[in-house]
Image (cartoon, helix red, strand yellow):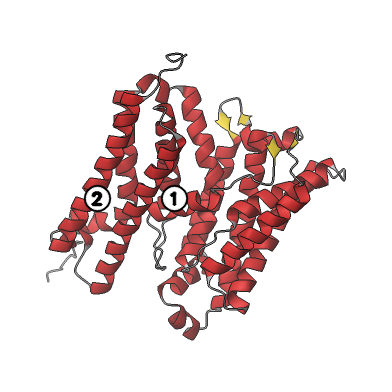
Amino acid sequence: MSTTSTIPVQKPLTERIEPYIAIIGPMVMILAILLFMGAAEPTRYFRVTNINLILLDVALYLPMAMAMTFVITQRGIDLSIGSIAALSSILMAFLVKQYGFSIYVGVPLAILFGAFMGLINGLIITRFNVPDLIGTLAMDLVYRGFALVIAKGLVLARFPDFLTEIGRGQITGFIPIPVVIGIATMIAGYWALRKTYFGRYTIAIGSDPEAAALTGISVNRYKVYAYVLSGAAAALAGLMLTGKLNAVQATSAPLFNLHVIAAVVVGGTSLFGGRASMIGSFCGCLLLAMMINALVTLRIEFFWQSVASGVVIIGSVALYSWIQKKDRDGSGGVLAALQTPDGQKMLRFSALLIGLLIALLALGGIFAVTPGASG
């Protein structure tokens, strides 16, 4: 009597790496930045103090990127996180400095304020059927207006040590506390996305809201949950920024929304919904922080930093839109689709954008003004 043994069939390499395409993209760009800066400015870019600056910048955006991943996966968008961060910190500052609240009470209350503002966003979108883009943009103006009214142009500074530790403290003099907070939020987000009903329902809602509703999922409720999470994460990031600067004003965090959305999209979360990558969002935050730091290290003007960020966003959205279209068309895999005429056009477009970024970095290194050279 013969027995047959089943030998598992190994998938081809192309099929094994396809799920990680969204992460490979930002990782390749991170490697390109490391190689370029290793040749152009190795001493300044790779010194310990500069690496610490990059990590602090990354940590600031990680909580918001985690929450924004859920929002965008549900086909939403939140343009109010910058003003929520500022208003939450302003309210905390007034509670602590004007009304004598303990910082240990003020910080949790600020996060609750942020969650409440996120709740307002979610209710406006779900109950009044206001599009996410318009609703959160309008509330961004409202929250920023409240911050300006409350602060009256004042800069509130010199907070207790607990807050500055959140923003720039270190554990054992080596590990930055903000980095620990940021990574902890990403780990929690990764777990929630993969292991909880909230994560599974988020992907289902983004894939097809009508089908999700027919299966019994309360689409509006889980949309509200995502915006509450976004508001709380924005408030936490605002507190981290306040602690880092040891000061806050009503105009703080003006570009939080664009930076965070860019990081999430660069990391592979689809603006069309249904596709999420928490690890990709982490890589997107790291990529943008490294790129902006590289431009600063090369003494490139701030305006060119915005240009570079825009180029990365356009390239990423174009790539992932093409990937999403390929999935809908069922063309048999990303790598196979790259062999088609459309795929070849996308490769040439991506190469052009990468070339533009490298040229920008190179021009910055060539035309940088050496300190003390003028005057």
User: Where residue 82 sits in the image (x, y, percent)?
Assistant: 59, 52
Of residues 236 and 300, the one drawn nearer to the viewer in this rendering = 300
Tell us which disc is closer to us: 2 or 1.
Answer: 2
Vertical position of residue 324 compared to residue 286: above or below: below
| Residue located 69% across and 42% down the image | 249
User: Where residue 193 sits in the image (x, y, percent)?
Assistant: 48, 61
Numbered disc 1: secondary structure: helix
On screen, residue 213 versus residue 316, left or right, reads: right
On screen, residue 216 versus residue 281, left or right, reads: right
> Is any part of residue 114 visible from this angle?
no
Figure quadrant of residue 293: top left
Q: In the rendered image, which residue does mark 2 sit on?
A: 350
Vertical position of residue 83 compared to residue 155: above or below: below
- Residue type at numbered disc 1: Ala
| Residue located 48% across and 34% down the image | 54
Of residues 332 and 263, the one drawn nearer to the viewer in this rendering = 263
Of residues 142 and 220, the one drawn nearer to the viewer in this rendering = 142
| Residue located 40% across and 73% down the image | 207
Q: Which residue, as the protein is rendered here, is positioned at the far bottom? A: 214
Numbered disc 2: secondary structure: helix
Of residues 21 and 118, the one drawn nearer to the viewer in this rendering = 118
User: Where residue 345 sits in the image (x, y, percent)?
Assistant: 18, 57
On screen, residue 257 versus residue 91, left or right, reads: left
Q: Which residue, as the protein is rendered here, is positioned at the far right? A: 99
Q: In the rendered image, which residue does mark 1 sit on?
A: 263
| Residue located 54% across and 61% down the image | 78
Vertical position of residue 211 compared to residue 365: above or below: below
User: Where residue 152 sits in the image (x, y, percent)?
Assistant: 77, 46
Quadrant in which the N terminus appears: bottom left
